[in-house]
Image (cartoon, rainbow, N blue to C red):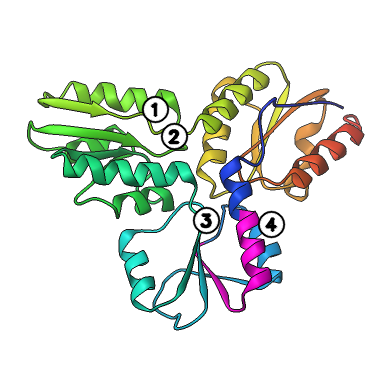
Amino acid sequence: MKVLVAEKCGFCPGVKSAIMLAKKTLAEHEHVYSLGPIIHNDDVVRELAQKGLTTIDSVDPIDEGTVLIRSHGATLKQLEKLKAKHLQIVDATCVLVKRVQKIARQLQEEGYKVVMIGDAHHPETQAVVGFAKDVVVIGEASDLSNLQGQGKLGIICQTTDSPDHFAEMIAEIAKRGFSELKIINTLCRETKQRQNAAVKLCKTVEIMFVLGGLHSANTKKLAELCKKHNNSTFHLQNWEELDKTVLKGKKIAGVTAGASTPDRVIDELVANLRAFEADS
C-alpha cells in the first residue's frame, strides 16, 4: 500500500518541552506527581508512569514531593493551593497557554467581560478560566445565550480550536449588539499548520488515518476536519487499534497525527500500512 504522511504532524514544541521536563524532574526528584495527564497520549503517560510519574486529579491528597504542572496548565486556585502546601512546583505549561492565561487576566483588568471560545471541559480552557472572573466559554452557537447585556467583550480562544470555528463564533457574537469587541487571536500556529496539512492530504488519498489520544482536543479536531473532506477517515491511537477490514481494496492511505503523538507511533503505523497487502 502506498502511504503518504502529512507535511506537518506529530509532537509540537510545547509537548516536547513538557516531556523533556518531566523526564528531567523524574531523574532529579523522588515522589513526582503530575496534576492531570502530562499530555493527552496514553502511551506516553504509561511510559512516564513506569519511570515514577504519578498522575493525580486533585492537589488535596499530596503533602510532600514535587508537582509537575501539565502542558495544559493549572488554575490559579490549584497553583495557590500547591504553594500553600509548600510543595515544589515544576511548570510544564505550554508557553502559548500561559500567554492565553495572561491575556484573560489582562482583559478582565481592562474592564472587558472575558469570552473564551473552546471546549468548557478541556483542561486548557479550565486553566485559563481560572485566571479571570466569570469567564463565559462558548463551545457552540447554543452557548451564546449565556452572553447577556450590551457591554464590551474581550474574546480569546482555546489554542487548539480551528480558525473556521473561531471565526464562526465571532461572527455570531458580532450580531448580538455588544458595544465593543476586543478580539485576540490566541490560536496556536502549530495547530493551524497541522490542520492545513491534514486537510490538504486527506483530499488526495482513499483512506485517512489520524493518530493520537482519543481525549486529545487537537487530534479530535484533525479527525473532524479530515472527515469533512474524506469520509474514510479514522481516528485511532496506534496500529493495534486498526480494524484491518477498512483497508480492503484501498491502495493509497494518508497519515497525520496530533501534537501529542510520538514519532514511534507514527512510524509503526506507516511501516505496517506499507507492508499491508490490500487484497489479503
Q: Which residue lies at the image location 75% right of the left edge and 43% below the top edge?
A: 263
Q: Nearer the viewer, mark 1 or mark 3?
A: 3
- Could you say which is closer to the camera, residue 128 or residue 102? 102
Q: Is residue 97 above or below residue 201?
A: below
- Return the residue at label 1: 165
Spatial CA span between label 4 and label 1: 30 Å
Q: Is residue 79 above or below residue 216?
A: below
At label 3, counting other C-alpha atoms closer than 10 Å, the crowd grade (few under 14, some 14-19, many 20 or more) is: many
Q: Which sits earlier in the primary sequence, circle 2 or circle 3?
A: 3
- Return the residue at label 2: 161
Secondary element under disc 2, as helix, strand or loop, is: loop
- Could you say which is closer to the camera, residue 61 or residue 220? 61
- Could you say which is closer to the camera, residue 65 or residue 8? 65
Which amino acid is tagged 3?
Ala
Q: Which residues are magenta?
A: 19-36
Quadrant position of residue 172: top left
